[in-house]
Every structure is written in structure tokens, then in C-alpha cells.
Image (cartoon, rainbow, N blue to C red):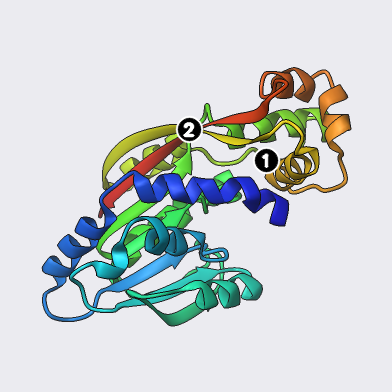
Amino acid sequence: MEAFYTLATDDYRHLAAALDWRAWLEARQAEAGDRALHLLDVACGSGKFPTALTAHADVARAAIRPVDYALLDPSSFSLAEARQALAPPFVAGRAFETTLQGFDTQDRSYDIVWATHALYAIPKAELPAALERFLRAIGGRGFIAHAMEAAHYIRFYRLFLDAFRDGGGESYRTAEEIVDGLGRLGARVELREIAYDSAAPAAARSVVEGFLQRCAFDDGVTLDQMLDHPLTGPYLADCHDEHAWRFPQRVGLIFVSP
């Protein structure tokens, strides 16, 4: 996990730089009036997104009340980590140890519901239910950041399954699937895209190995095995040279109104 976040933490820095989040939060506060904003972080992980916002987006100086920040994740460890990571203007509120598709909430409970690099492992058959729960929770605005079909996270995992699982296993969900699913549920969706590389020095093989293993949720396949396989090898060969490893990312920024 440490090796994964050596590269993946940059995902959240790019998200923090993609929008004037300080102004965005101030606009949400204006919509809510004098009361505190209520926010739900879906599949919050270890709190990398709010950490990036406080570090890179100047949200601590936003003209807003402290944000009541609810956490949702199926992992109790992640909930505890995310709670510890929160800093002003975010104040830890309720915690829900559940998947999104298993989440039960009253309608329109939150001014903001967001999910950042969080929905990849939802089974395709359960995606409509998960997105319906997401929409039900939104009392104001929703935001999802998710890899597009052409992004490294999606492409590499499909190749990994073909190479080391004989094609078995389910691919990660894509931003395109999420946008389509939200549209089918009648949501209003605005999609923007950002592109960047997840990068590491050429010599950082152990970091790259850990990153790729975490991308595939399998630490039993080594980097050498990935490089040697006729399916994953050519892809990875295109991702590095004598100077650096670069894994191309394309991320959909999905703004949602129910």
C-alpha cells in the first residue's frame, strides 16, 4: 500500500488542482445558508482527497462553516484512517461501515456527496443500485472522480486479468459506465476530463512493483513476471524508458445533480 500511494497520492493532487475547490465549497455554503454543510465521502479510503484539498487547494481559508464530514467505507481500518486525516474545514461526523450499494440513508441527506477513485470494484450487476444510493443521498451536489476507459488503472487491470487469471474476474468500472448509469437514472451530469502521468524514476522498481500489484490487488505476481508476459509486457514496455516510468491517466470529473 505504501508503494501504491507513492504514485497514487498524485492522483489527488491533480484533483485538487483541477478546480477552484475553495470557491466551489463557498458556493455550496451559499446554497445551504447559515447552517453547516453536510458532506458524505463515499468509499473514503484513508482520506487522501480531503488531505489533498487542505494541502493544495487552500480550502482551510474558504468562507464556510466547519463541514460535517461523514465517512462511508466497508473497511473499519479505512474509516479510522480517514477520520484521523481530516483537518479544517472538515470535521469528522458519522461513519458508515458498508459498501455504497448496501448503504441505507434517508433521501437527500447531504449537501455534498463525493467519491474519488472509489468505485472501481463495484460489480457491474450492482452498479445501478450503487448509483441509485449515491443519488438518493444528494441534497445538493454530487462529484465523482474516476478513471476513463483509456486510463492506466482500467487498461492494466484488464490485461492483468487476461494474463494471470485466464481472462477471469471482473474488470474495473469505468467513468463512461458511471456517466451512462447516472443518465439512465435521470441525473443531470456534467463531465470534464483531465490527463496526466503517474510517474516514478526508472530505478524505483520496488515502488513500481508495489504500485502495479496494488492496481491489480495481487502482490503474488512480480514486476519481472508482468514484464515477461506477452500480454502485460508490451504495455509496460511502453510505460518506461531509461529515465522514468510513466503510466498515462485520464480521469473523468463527474458533477452530478439528482
Position of 243 relative to 25 (above/below): above
Expressed as whole percent of the image width and height from the top left, the position of residue 232 reads: 76, 25
Kind of residue at disc 2: Tyr
Q: Which one is nearer the viewer's eye here, 218 or 90? A: 90
Q: Nearer the viewer, mark 1 or mark 2?
A: 2
Q: Decide if residue 2 is on the left or right side of residue 189.
A: right
Position of 67 relative to 217 (above/below): below
Kind of residue at disc 1: Glu
Position of 49 relative to 68 (above/below): above
Give how far apart the Cα atoms at labels 1 and 2 are.
Answer: 26 Å
Is disc 1 placed on a helix, strand or loop? loop
Rendered image quadrant of residue 54:
bottom left
Expressed as whole percent of the image width and height from the top left, the position of residue 183 reads: 32, 41
Rendered image quadrant of residue 160:
top right
* Quadrant of the rendering where the N terminus is positioned: bottom right
Q: Residue at x 46, y 56 (%)?
A: 129
Is residue 1 in sight in this rendering?
Answer: no
* Quadrant of the rendering where the C terminus is positioned: bottom left
Dot 2: few (<14), some (14–19), or many (≥20) neighbours within 10 Å?
some
Q: Residue at x 77, y 28 (%)?
A: 162
Q: Looking at the image, tell me whether mark 1 or mark 2 is earlier in sequence order.
A: 1
Q: Are marks 1 and 2 in contact (CB under 8 Å)?
A: no
Expressed as whole percent of the image width and height from the top left, the position of residue 82 reads: 53, 71
Position of 17 relative to 63 (above/below): above
Expressed as whole percent of the image width and height from the top left, the position of residue 184 reads: 34, 42
Which residue in the structure is indicated by mark 1? 170
Is residue 124 in sight in this rendering?
Answer: yes
Is disc 2 placed on a helix, strand or loop? strand
Q: Residue at x 45, y 37 (%)?
A: 251
Q: Which one is nearer the viewer's eye here, 159 or 239? A: 239
Rendered image quadrant of residue 154:
top right
Which residue in the structure is indicated by mark 2? 196
